[in-house]
Image (cartoon, grey):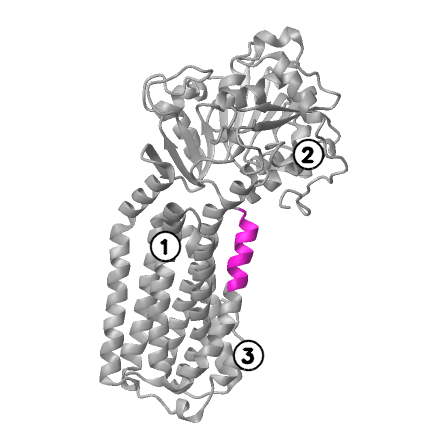
Amino acid sequence: MIDPPESALTGALGPPEAMTPARLPVPAGLGRLLVLAVVFVCAACGLVYELELVALATYLVGDSVTQASVVLSVMVFAMGVGALLAKRLRCRAAVGFGAVEAALALVGGCSAMALYACFAWYGQSRSALVGFSLAIGVLIGAEVPLLMTLIQRVRRQDAGGAVADLFAADYVGALVGGLAFPFLLLPCFGQLTGALVTGAINATAGGVLVLWLFRHDLTVRARWALLGVNVLVLVLLAAGVLLATPFERAARRAVYGSSARVAVQTGVQEVVMTGGTGPGVGAGRGRKGSGPPLELYLDGRLRVSADTEFRYHEALVHPALAGGPHARVLVLGGGDGLAVREILRHGGVRSVTVVELDPGVVRLARTDPGLSRLNQHSMDDPRVHVVTADAFDWLRRQGAHGRHPAPYDVVVSDLPDPGITASTKLYSQEFYGMAARMLAPDGRLVVHAGPPGTRARSYWTVEATVRSVGLATVPYRLPGRPADVSGGPDRLGGPARSAAEEEHTAAPPPGGPRYWGFVLAARHPPRFVHASDAPHLGGLTVDELLAGRSGVARARIPGLRASTLMHPQYLD
């Protein structure tokens, strides 16, 4: 929790009529302990609401830095407003606190469901995000002045001591709430039900304090009114818990369409798959199946579309493997098995190491009929070894303590788009420096670098960052289908696009080509495709790859700075 203005705190100690001793059903010492316990619970719930808004906004809108900044700054402002408004309630602090907690429980508990509904059925959630941040902030800010009045009515003490006790309980509660959100609420209940359960705890704590401990401060009418309001809030929250699963299914259909058939929360991200159920579906390379093509979404962003993924993965893999030895291959990301499928097409591949953060994606790649058919069961090949780890941390461990692992002939970086905040470290100078140390003397590194047309500055920043670690580069691109709105692995588009992605996809002219961008790198200028490589390029041709190299080179943006962990360059 964050401190309200000091003027509100000092003002909470008066006027005199608000300081008359309360008639309590328990000794004053125990009453004071109960008030502090409620402070603890309310602080924990308040922080859960904040974290819930940040997490859901990041998932629905994207760019965690921006969303966290918006939510927290708006809430801090609103908390100040709420603390000042609460001064008007000091004379009836018990009634005011009961009403504030009931409202906070309802608004905070239903916030996740309301935001998801706005996103699913209205296509945007920014306005709702700001509105809920304001409302929750005002209500949280009103708590401390009212609690200060109540605790002083239990037993008077100096203002400094009262503030210290109150804030100690508040901050410890915030610690517990902050830890409970990722380690208890999300794994056990998920985002929607977790928020509703938090609201129920919030309403219960506030109701018990006012309706029992301070019941003599209430008129009969006020007591019954608060009891009715709290019961209504708890009933609504319970109904929300019961309806959370069908609501989520309906919202998912609104976002992904009726063909959504897999939806799992893996602990790392939400994974949704649509289509890909009929025989031959997703066969790729222009062959039609008997049903809708498979599409894979991770946290609402389209990552794989069976209509176009084969061109992306061919362009990512084949130029790098055709350029030299490829007995040992390292894939960073690529848990769907599609890049591995292309790697295994090359003779001479003896081992493939896949470093994938999410074991749930790997499990689906092996067991889901549609995805395993699309990757041609590549993840079951005995040459493939899967490591569950963050790619950055895994590379760092390989070079720690003087270790010198066997070098790789090819490193394939098949990672989320650099424009996604959580991925910026995977496109940093430090990351590429560690990846370069894994290369054999004549090894090659190939990087998916995002769309060079719609995000040219980001693409060329990736290229500049790769060069900054001493590697020579060959940038190239490959067009997807004309007017391809599903975007494929470049994470641009599909029914669950973020607002930022909508802005980027609006850039190309209607019907114009959309490009996938790549960077091939090595310690010496890497050999790009030659005519003799034609049999090893899958469905691609030497001419279109050479055209992709020359076409992207004409659009180079010179003088860009390398992106580092301390100075990321992809968020402009």
Nearer-N-terminus badge (3/2) = 3
The numbered dot on residue 514 is none
Q: Which residue is mark 3?
A: 6
Residue at image coords 36%, 56%: 195
- Residue type at mark 1 is Ala
Vertical placement of 85 versus 205: above or below? Answer: below
In magenta segment, residue 69: yes
Residue at image coords 51%, 28%: 483
Give the magenta part as a residue range: 63-74
- Residue type at mark 2 is Trp
Provide the secondary structure element on which disc 3 rests.
helix
Q: Position of residue 117 (x, y in %)?
A: 36, 50
Q: Residue 391 or 568: which is nearer the viewer?
A: 568
Q: Residue 123 or 170: which is nearer the viewer?
A: 123
Picture quadrant where residue 256 is located: top left
Q: Which residue is mark 1?
A: 114
Q: Which residue is mark 2?
A: 460
Crowdedness near tag 2: few (<14), some (14–19) or many (≥20) residues, C-alpha within 10 Å = many
- Residue type at mark 3 is Glu
Nearer-N-terminus badge (1/2) = 1
**Left or right: residue 518 compared with residue 511:** right
